[in-house]
């Protein structure tokens, strides 16, 4: 059985798929079929209910699932990946203050977090465009955003201070 941990709106669900058409959701077993219609659109039947859904990858284990007209941002990891992530988070060193600097010159395309927001190690904080490529600048530590020096639409040099975490 292929088992995954799916997080939707901070709620974690354990999902397992077997080859004989069985689906386990948090240890409750259901009959299921999944048919690809085209591209990212699927027809999912669980027990006696049928759902039309689309799934678009968001990068780094994220997927955007559209179901019943609503878009859900999900995080999908194997059970092993989930355990490893939990272990890394539990052993992450808490720093008193960390200043993140630009690894290269470029343009700030998007600031995803705001001052005071709590973040965990690995969270995406901003997007830096360099040489026509978007680079996801992630948090190296767990804490909260103390200051954001980078502004959307502004150019930064290599080594420029982008944001501070405490």
Image (cartoon, helix red, strand yellow):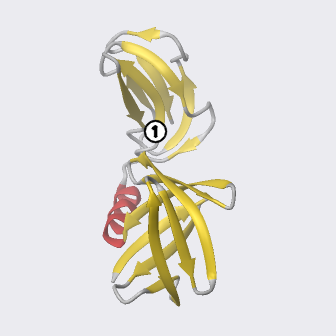
User: Is residue 121 shown left or right of residue 7?
Assistant: left
Identify which residue is drawn at 41% across, 41% down. Answer: 95
Identify which residue is drawn at 61% across, 75% down. Answer: 50
Where does the image place residue 70, in percent across and percent down from the top left? 68, 55
From this viewpoint, which residue is outermost toward the front?
Answer: 37
Identify which residue is drawn at 33% across, 85% down. Answer: 19
Name the element at disc 1: strand
Q: In this view, does 30 lie above or below 100?
A: below
Where does the image place residue 83, in percent across and percent down from the top left? 36, 68
Q: How many labels does the image show?
A: 1
Identify which residue is drawn at 52% across, 18% down. Answer: 149
Q: Nearer the viewer, residue 43 or 151?
A: 43
Where does the image place residue 76, in percent across and percent down from the top left? 43, 62
User: Is residue 140 shown left or right of residue 74?
Assistant: left
Q: In this view, does 81 lie above or below 145?
A: below
Number of residues whose C-alpha sits closer than 10 Å to that of mark 1, classed few (under 14), some (14–19) or many (20 or more): some
Q: Is residue 157 above or below residue 35?
A: above
Where does the image place residue 55, in percent across and percent down from the top left? 49, 55
Q: In this view, does 124 lie above or below 48?
A: above
Quadrant of residue 151 within the rendered picture: top right
User: Is residue 82 shown left or right of residue 7?
Assistant: left
Q: In which quarter of the image is the N terminus?
A: bottom left
Quadrant of residue 35 within the rendered picture: bottom left
User: Is residue 6 shown left or right of residue 1?
Assistant: right
Mark 1, residue position: 124
């Amino acid at each position: 059985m292929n088992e995954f941990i799916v997080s939707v709106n901070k709620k974690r669900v354990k999902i397992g798929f077997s080859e004989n058409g069985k689906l386990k959701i948090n240890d409750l077993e259901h009959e299921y079929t999944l048919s690809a219609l085209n591209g990212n659109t699927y027809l999912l039947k669980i027990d006696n209910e049928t759902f039309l859904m689309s799934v678009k990858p968001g990068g780094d284990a994220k997927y955007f699932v559209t179901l019943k007209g609503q878009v859900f941002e999900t995080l999908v990891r194997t059970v092993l990946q989930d355990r490893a992530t939990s272990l890394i988070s539990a052993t992450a060193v808490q720093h008193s203050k960390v200043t993140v600097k630009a690894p290269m010159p470029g343009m700030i395309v998007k600031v995803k977090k705001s001052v005071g927001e709590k973040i965990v190690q690995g969270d995406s904080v901003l997007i830096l465009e360099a040489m026509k490529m978007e680079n996801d600048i992630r948090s190296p530590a767990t804490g909260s955003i103390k200051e954001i020096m980078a502004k959307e639409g502004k150019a930064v040099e290599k080594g420029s201070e982008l944001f501070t975490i405490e």
